Amino acid sequence: QVQPVESGGGLVQAGGSLRLSCTASSSIFRINAMAWYRQAPGKQRELVAEITSGGNTNYLDSVKGRFTISRDNAKNTAYLQMNSLKPEDTAVYYCNVEYGMGKLRWGQGTQVTVSS
């Protein structure tokens, strides 16, 4: 069983930075892609950034140039560095992990609030 655990959310002023972490410990399964999604009140959950085990990345257009996803494969941990935050980035951020033969698991979510 793989259970992602997120950390690093909080309250920040517009223009500030936060770094989210997601650790998906597993002694059995290989961790494949890791991704960050977010969901704002009244909106659908959307993909923010994803990274494969080989390091290939993909970003939501509105965060390109501001957010950077990275990972430490030895620690099964993915990071989301968020710079130049805007009020519209306010949401619950969820880690999603693909492991084994295409199985998916969500983290519990971490709140990011950007004040104007």
Image: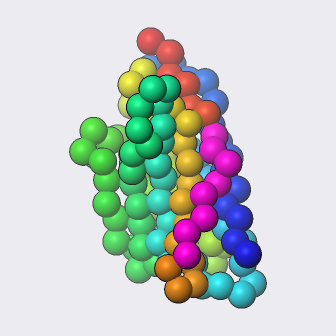
Q: Residue 2: horizontal and vertical position, in percent?
A: 70, 71
Secondary structure, magenta segment, majority class: strand
Q: Is residue 89 above or below residue 47?
A: above
Whether residue 103 is visible: yes
Q: Is residue 38 above or below residue 73?
A: above
Q: Residue 94: horizontal and vertical position, in percent?
A: 56, 48
Image-based side of 15 in relation to 23, left or right: left
Q: Start and end of the magenta stretch?
A: 103-110
Asked whether residue 16 is drawn in magenta, I would say no
Image-based side of 97 in relation to 84, left or right: right
Q: Is residue 29 above or below residue 39?
A: below
Which residue appears at 57% of the width and 84% of the height? 100
| Picture mark count | 0
Whether residue 85 is visible: no
Q: Quadrant of the C terminus?
A: top left
Which residue is more in the foreground, 6 or 107?
Answer: 107
Which residue appears at 60% of the width and 64% of the height? 105
Q: Is residue 15 above or below residue 74?
A: above
Image-based side of 48 in relation to 112, left or right: left
The quarter holding residue 52 reads: bottom left
Q: Residue 84: horizontal and vertical position, in percent?
A: 39, 31
Q: Residue 21: horizontal and vertical position, in percent?
A: 61, 53
The residue furthest top is 116
Which residue is more in the foreground, 8 or 29?
Answer: 29
Which residue appears at 56% of the width and 36% of the height? 92
Which residue is more in the foreground, 92 or 81?
Answer: 92
